[in-house]
Amino acid sequence: RKAEFVSDLRILFEDESLIVVDKPAGLLSIATESERERTAYHELTEYLRNAPTRRRERVWIVHRLDRETSGLMVFAKTATAKSILQQGWDEVEKRYQAVVEGTPPAEHGTFESDLNEASPSKVHSAPQSERTRHAVTQYRVLARFGTRALVELTLVTGRRHQIRVHLADAGCPVVGDEKYGATTNPAKRLALHACGLAFRHPTTQKAMRFESPLPAELMRLVSRSTSRRRSRPSR
């Protein structure tokens, strides 16, 4: 069906069990102590409560994206759907695209480390211990553009800041990710986008697949780099 907009969100799919949305960068997934209302959760809850044909009064959070990460999110519309989706979340295909500074070590491969998530503000790789959780990210380079690269990443595990830490550890932090070592921020946002989700519908078991293209402000980073590279005189 045609995508519908709810404030900052684009609804890609909705039925009695779930809502799939495309979240913009800058919008929280759920409330924090400092921000209660400008969240994807709040906007969808208001949408359900205010629409005249709706009887649902809330949504259930299934997973989160960082505030500055854009892309695909799925919310449940019943407690049962939430439980089923979360129980099978490790089997969900979760793909991201990132514009990075530098380039990964190979055209494709796997990042793997143990992450210490004890700090609420920053995660880091550390020797395996009772305080760490193992994290695995598969990657492939889609294109290289001089000092940047466009990388697709697939989560094998789902740890906090996993992609951001793994790319920083590899010497190619996400553009705009000052927290993890980036030195440039031309798009004034984190250059990380949740581009693909694939899972079984919690009620019908139908295979569901959603794609979201790289946002224009991130595509421009790639386009400008391409233009500069192509404009160089041949030798």
Image (cartoon, grey):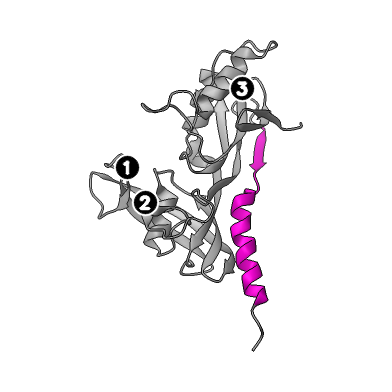
The local crowd at label 2, few if under 14, some if 14 to 19, many if 20 or more residues have their Cα within 10 Å, is some
Q: Which type of secondary structure does the marked residue at label 1 adopt?
A: loop
* Residue, far left: 130
Q: Which residue has dot 2 on it?
A: 179
Labels in figure, total: 3
Q: Does the image show residue 212?
A: yes
The verdict on residue 88 being magenta is no
Nearer to us of marks 3 and 1 is: 1
Q: Position of residue 30 (x, y in %)?
A: 46, 28
Q: Alpha carbon of mark 3 to alpha carbon of mark 1: how far? A: 33 Å
Residue drawn at the location 65% of the way across and 19% of the way down? 16
Q: Are marks 3 and 2 in contact (CB under 8 Å)?
A: no
Q: What's the amino acid at mark 2?
A: Lys
- Residues drawn in magenta: 206-231
Task: Judge from the rendering whether residue 1 lies leftward or rightward of residue 108; answer left or right.
Answer: right
Residue 225, by quadrant, is: bottom right
Residue 166, by quadrant, is: bottom left
Q: Position of residue 111 (x, y in %)?
A: 42, 59
Q: Which residue has dot 3 on it?
A: 17
Helix, strand or loop for the magenta stretch, by majority: helix
Q: Does the image show residue 214?
A: no
Quadrant position of the N terminus in the picture: top right
The local crowd at label 3, few if under 14, some if 14 to 19, many if 20 or more residues have their Cα within 10 Å, is some
Q: What's the amino acid at mark 3?
A: Ser
Q: Which residue has dot 1 on it?
A: 121
> In terms of sequence position, does the residue under pointer 3 or pointer 2 come before the other?
3
Q: Alpha carbon of mark 3 to alpha carbon of mark 2: how far? A: 37 Å
> In terms of sequence position, does the residue under pointer 2 or pointer 1 come before the other?
1
Question: Considering depth in this image, is 132 or 73 the residue closer to the camera?
Answer: 73
